[in-house]
Image: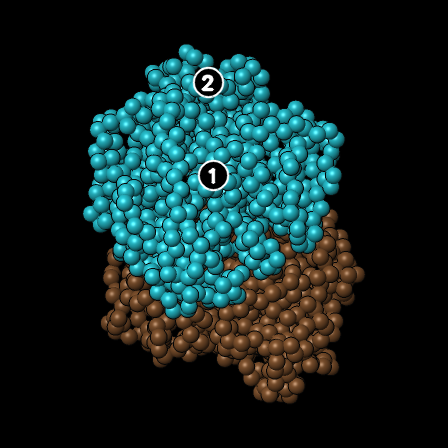
Chain colours: A cyan, B brown
Amino acid sequence: MIRRYDYGTPLLTDAVVLSVEPEKGNPGGITVEDLKPGIRFTLPMTEETQLFGLGQAVRGIDKRGHIYRSWNTDDVLHTENKAALYGSHNFLLIVNPGDTLGLFLDDPGDIRWDLGATEENQIVITSLGGDVSLYLIQDRDPLTVCRAFRGLIGKSYIPPFWAFGYIQSRWGYAGEEDITKVVTEHRQKHIPMDGICLDIDYMDRFRDFTWNPKTVPDPAGMVKRLREKNVHVIPIIDAGIPVDENDPACADGLKNDTFVHREDGSLFQAAVWPGLCYFTDYLNTRCRNWFGDLYRPMLEAGVDGFWNDMNEPSLFYSRDGLEAAWKEIDSLKDRNLGQSEFWALKRAVDSLANNPEDYRAFWHDMDGQKVRHDRVHNLYGAGMTKAAMDGMHRFDPDRRFLLFTRSSYIGSHRYGGIWTGDNCAWWSHLKLNLQMLPGLSMCGYLFSGADLGGFNNDTTGDLVLRWLELGIFVPLMRNHAALGTREKDICRFSRWKDMRNIVTLRYALLPFLYSEFLKAVDSGTPLFMPLAFLYPGDTVACHTQDQVMLTEQCMIAPVYEQNAVGRHVYLPEDMLMLRMRSCTDMDACVMEKGAHFVPCALNEALLFIRKGYQIPLVMHDVESTVDLRAGLSFTMAGWKDAQPYELWEDDGEHVSAPVISRTLAPGRGADNRSGLLR
Amino acid sequence: MIRRYDYGTPLLTDAVVLSVEPEKGNPGGITVEDLKPGIRFTLPMTEETQLFGLGQAVRGIDKRGHIYRSWNTDDVLHTENKAALYGSHNFLLIVNPGDTLGLFLDDPGDIRWDLGATEENQIVITSLGGDVSLYLIQDRDPLTVCRAFRGLIGKSYIPPFWAFGYIQSRWGYAGEEDITKVVTEHRQKHIPMDGICLDIDYMDRFRDFTWNPKTVPDPAGMVKRLREKNVHVIPIIDAGIPVDENDPACADGLKNDTFVHREDGSLFQAAVWPGLCYFTDYLNTRCRNWFGDLYRPMLEAGVDGFWNDMNEPSLFYSRDGLEAAWKEIDSLKDRNLGQSEFWALKRAVDSLANNPEDYRAFWHDMDGQKVRHDRVHNLYGAGMTKAAMDGMHRFDPDRRFLLFTRSSYIGSHRYGGIWTGDNCAWWSHLKLNLQMLPGLSMCGYLFSGADLGGFNNDTTGDLVLRWLELGIFVPLMRNHAALGTREKDICRFSRWKDMRNIVTLRYALLPFLYSEFLKAVDSGTPLFMPLAFLYPGDTVACHTQDQVMLTEQCMIAPVYEQNAVGRHVYLPEDMLMLRMRSCTDMDACVMEKGAHFVPCALNEALLFIRKGYQIPLVMHDVESTVDLRAGLSFTMAGWKDAQPYELWEDDGEHVSAPVISRTLAPGRGADNRSGLLR
C-alpha cells in the first residue's frame, strides 16, 4: 500500500503515474517539523538499519553515513564528499530486518539528506522549500517495496535494440571525417560497434540543431553512409539557445516567447558553450513542445539517437553575475591587494558558475502557474528529456529512439536514459560506476551507464580494459572522453585485442541482457540490486558494497583495482562462475559459498550464476546488433539441472512491437569445480 | 653494491651520506637519452614487474600504471590522478622475480616518472633539468636493496618518546584557552594524550615566531601548565617571513640578507598567510642557520616540538604574478566578455597560486653557487627542516625535539618527520594512508603520519573511529582538521568511548612500536613494507594492495570502507589474529593461510602476527607516555612456542641515550581458533 502525505503546496512534477489520495495528519514513526520555510522529517535508525536508493549519488551502495543533497549540479569532480550530482532521485529505502520503508519525496527543490552523518542513528531529511508530496511504501522486504515504487512512477524507457550495442564517443570528433576514421578502424579490427556520438564539436559554433558546414557538409549523407556500416550517429544537444537573432532557433524562440524570463519580464541570459544563451521553459507544455520540434530536421536527416547535455542547467556565468563580478573586481583593484582582497578576487571569479543567485533569478510558467526556478530546479533536465522524446514521437510515434541525458528527476526515466556525467579516469570511478547501478535501477533509470575508461584525465590501457569488463553488463555501454585527454578508443591501445574480445562478450550476453531489461521494465524489479535484497539473513552479503546482483539470476564482481591479479569475492551461496575472455573463449566452475580470492587476469571478465539458473549466450562473433537479430543459436551456461530460461524478445525498433517470450531448454550445465562450459 | 652515474652537473643535495665514486659510461639495461636540456632513462618491464617506493605519492602500493612527478606541491586535493604531492622521494624499486633494482635519482628538480602508464611495459623517467646523480642498487630481493639504500641516505630521525603518543590538533585553536579546554576534556574522559598542536591561529597576524598576545599572553606559562598535565605544545612555523620592517624576523633577515633574490638582485615577494612575504634561502648555510636560531625564544619558553608548513614553498600569488594578472584582467574588461575571455579571466586568477613562473623567478646562493630555484625546488622544504633541527640542537645538542614538516626531499628524513599534508575526510584517504606507509618507510620517512579522520571536509564518527584503528600503528598519530570543518576531537562523538578505547591500544602497543622503530632506524629495514617483500613466491600476496607488513613480525589490514562489518583479508601463511577493543580487552585466534572475510565491528582493531612471533603489550590503562616509562609489565601476545622478543628501549629524551636491549621470554601463546589471549 502506498500512502501519501502532502506538505505546503506540492507542484505537478510528472514523477508519479498512479493517483494516490493524500492522507490527513502525519505518518507514524516520522517526526515532522515545519521550519517555515521548509519541512523536516526525522526518522530513527538502529545499528542494523541499511539505506539504499537515491539513484545517482556518490559513495557505496549503502548510503548511510553521508549528507546528500537533491540539487542537480554540473560538478566535474565526483569525489566522495560531494552531496549532489546531475540528477535528483528522491527515493530512499530504509531497510531493517523484516521491515522496509520506501520513502519518496516528490519535491523538485533543494533537499538535504543527513543519513546518519551528523547523528549516527538518525535520518534527517530537510526540504528547503517545504512543498512536498511524501510517498511511503512499507513492506517486509525491499524488493516488494521497489516494485511498488516502480509501479507508482511508471514504466521505464526502452531504447531501440541497437542502443545496447557498443558505442564510441569523444569530445573532439569534429565531424564525418573523424568519426568515419574511427568506425573504419573498429570494423577493420573486427571490434563490434553500433553507435558513435558527436559531442559539441559537430555544431556550428556550438549552436543547437546546426551542423558545422565544414566538418559535416552533408548530414543526411553522413548518417546514411554510417548506417550502411551498421553504425548509428548520436549527436549531442545542449540546453541553451544562443542569444543571436541570426540563429534560427533563437529567432523562432523569441518570436514564440519560449524562453524563461526574469521577474521583471526580461529574458534571462547566461553563458554556456555558445556564449550567452536563452533557456527554453521546458516546464511549460507549449515551450517544451516547441523545443521538441527543433529535433525534426535532424530526424529527417536520419538521426535516430541523441544525447541531451548541460541541462541542470549548467551556467558558466549569467550576464548579471558577470557584471556584479566586474564591479567587485574593480573595487578590489584600487586597494593594495592583501590576503582578504586576494581571496575576494578568487571568490568573485570562482563563484560565477552555477551560482545559486542565478537559479533564483528566473521564472517558469508551469502552464499558467508562475514558479521561481529554484523551487523546481531539479525538474529542468527532466523537462528537456520529455521535450526531446515527445518531439521524436511526434515525428514518428511508433519508432523507438535512443535518448540519454545528463540531468534528471524521477519521471524522466519514462522518456529517456541517463549517463552519469563527467567522471574521471579513476579506478575509484570504475568502482563508483558499479556501486551506482543498484540505486539507479531502483529509481527506474534502467538504461544508464558511465563513461567507460573515464571522461576527465588521461586513462591507461588497463583501466579501459577493466572498465569494459564491467561495461559489458551495463545497458548503456559507451566509451567517452574529454577534449585534450589521451585518445582512448580501443584501437589506441597495445591490448586492443583483449579489449575487442571483451566487447564481443557484450554481444554474446546481449539477448540475455535485453530480455532481462524488458522483464525489469515490465515487473518493476531492479535490473541491478544490492546483495541485501536477496540474502537478507546474511550479514556479510548485506554489507558487501562491491558486488551487485544482475537480476535474481546472476552476480557481478568486477576487478576495480589497478595491478590486481584478481579480487576477493564473497559468495552468499554456491555459485557457478563464468570466466570469460571472449564470446568463444570461456569456462565455468562451481564455487562454494564463502569468501574467495578469485584470480582474474587483465583479459578476463567474471559472471557468477546462482543455483538453478542457466543463461543464454551467443557464442559466435558478431560486429553489430544487426547480426544478433536473426536465427541465433544459444549456448546455455549455468548449473546442471537448471530451470528453462524464458527469453523475451521484440523487434527492437517499434514502440508497439509485441514482446515474444520463448522457452529455452537448459543445456547440460556444469556441476563441478573444473567443468568447462558445455 | 651501489653504483653511481652522473649526468649534467649534479648539485650537492645532502641526500646521501656515503661517498660513491661515479662510474664512467652508462648503466647496462637502461636506455639513456640526452634531451638537451634534460635526460631520459628508459627501462623495460615484463608483465610480472612490480614497482615500489616513491614515498609520498597517491594510488596503490605498487606504483605501476601512473605518471608521477617529482615537484613539491601544495595541492589540497589528493585525488588518484595527481602526479605530485608535498614531497619528492625519488627512490623506485623495480622488482622482478629474483631480481630487484633500486634506482635513486638525486636531482631536486622537476622529474616525470611514466611507470607503464603510456606504454604498458616501459618505465620512462625524465629529468627536465638533466643534472642527476643516478644511484643503482641491484640484488636478489627488495629488502636487501632497501637496506642498502637506507645505508646510502643515512639513519632516520628519531623523535622523543612522547611524540609517539596521541596528538590532538586543529586549525582554529586560538591559544591557551582553547587547547586547555580540549586537554582538560580529554583528561576528564581518560583519553590518553601526549601533545597538542597549534596551527597558524596562535600567531600574531600569522607571523612566524610571534604569539598572539590576546590568546597566548604567557607562552612559557602555557607550555609549563600543559606539561604539568603531561601534554606537549607543538606550534606551527611557516616558511615565509612577512614583508614588514616592523616585524623583528623581517628586519633581522633584511639586515643579514637572508632572503632569496630575483635575478636583478631585488627581493622575491609572494603572499602566504601573513600577506606578502620574503623567503629564507634555506639552501645557504648562513641563511639556514639564521632561520634555525629564530626558534630559540620559543625553545627557551619550553616548547620542544614544532611542525613546519607551507615550505614547498606554497605561494598564494607573487607580487609580479598579481600585477600581470591585473593587466590581463584589465585587458579583458574592455572587451564584450565572451567564452574565451571568460576562460581567460578564470585562468588569470586560478593560475596565480604556485605558478611555475614564480618558481623560476628567484635564485639561491648555495654556499657560493647561484642556482635558480626551479632547478632545486624540491630541496626547499628539506632545507627548512634542517634549519629547524640544527637550530634546536644548537640550543640543546643532546635533547631530542619533535619536528615534522610538510615538504621534503630524501635527506631531510635525518632531521625530522613528515605528515602527509592536507588530506580529506574521505574513506579513500584512510586507504591511501595505509598504502603510502611502505613507500615512506623505504625512503627513510619512518616518523610520519596522516591527519587522522581527514583534514578537509566534514568527517563522520565512523570514519574517525576506523581511521584511529589504523593510526594506532603509525608513528605519528595525530587527529587534525581544517578550519570550518566539523569539530572532530574524540570528545565530540557519541562513540567517544570506543575511540578512547582504541587510543588506549596505541599505548598498549607503544613499547613494541618504539622498539621496532629503533630497530628500523638502525637496520634500515622498512618499518612498513609490502607483502611482496616477504612472500615473493605468492602472487596474491605480492599484489595485495590493502594490507601492509608492520616489520617482519606483523601484518595490518584495517577496515577502510564505510558501513562494513569486516573485510576481506588474504593470509599468505597461517597467522594469529589479535582482535582488540581496548588495552585490556582483546582476544586472539589462529587463522589459516588463504582468503578470509574477517568480521570486524566498528570498535575493533585487528593485528595479524606471523608464526613464531610474540609481541609485548602493555595491558593496563595509561594516560600519557610518562606512565609508560617505569616498571612496565608486558603481556606477550602471539604464537605458542614463539621465539623470545628483543625489546629495545632508550631514555626517549636524549640524542646520546644508549639503546638498551632486553629479552622478553615468550608467554604461553595461542595455538587454536578460539584461544583467548593468555
Numbered tag placed on residue A287 in the rendering: 2
Q: Earlier in the sequence, mark 1 or mark 2?
A: 2
Q: Nearer the viewer, residue A194 or B634?
A: A194
Residue sitting at 30 percent across and 71 percent down?
B5
Residue at the spot of label 1: A521
Q: Nearer the viewer, residue A356 or A626?
A: A626
| Distance (Cα) linking label 1 and label 2 | 30 Å
Judge whether A661 appears above or below B9 on screen.
above
Judge whether A92 appears above or below A328 on screen.
below
Residue sitting at 51 percent across and 36 percent down?
A87
Find residue B159 and report its horizontal and vertical position in percent: 60, 70
Instruction: Decide if residue A185 is on the left or right side of residue B658.
Output: left
> Tag 2: residue type?
Cys
Residue sitting at 66 percent across and 48 percent down?
A99
Instruction: Identify the chain of the residue marked 1, using the numbered disc in the image.
Output: A
Judge whether B494 appears above or below A11 on screen.
below
Q: Residues within 10 Å of mark 2 (few under 14, many from 20)?
A: many
Q: Secondary structure at mark 1?
A: helix
Q: Determine contact: label 1, label 2, CB under 8 Å.
A: no
Badge nearest the viewer, 1 or 2: 1
Instruction: Decide if residue A336 is on the left or right side of residue B348.
Output: right
Q: Is residue A505 visible?
A: no
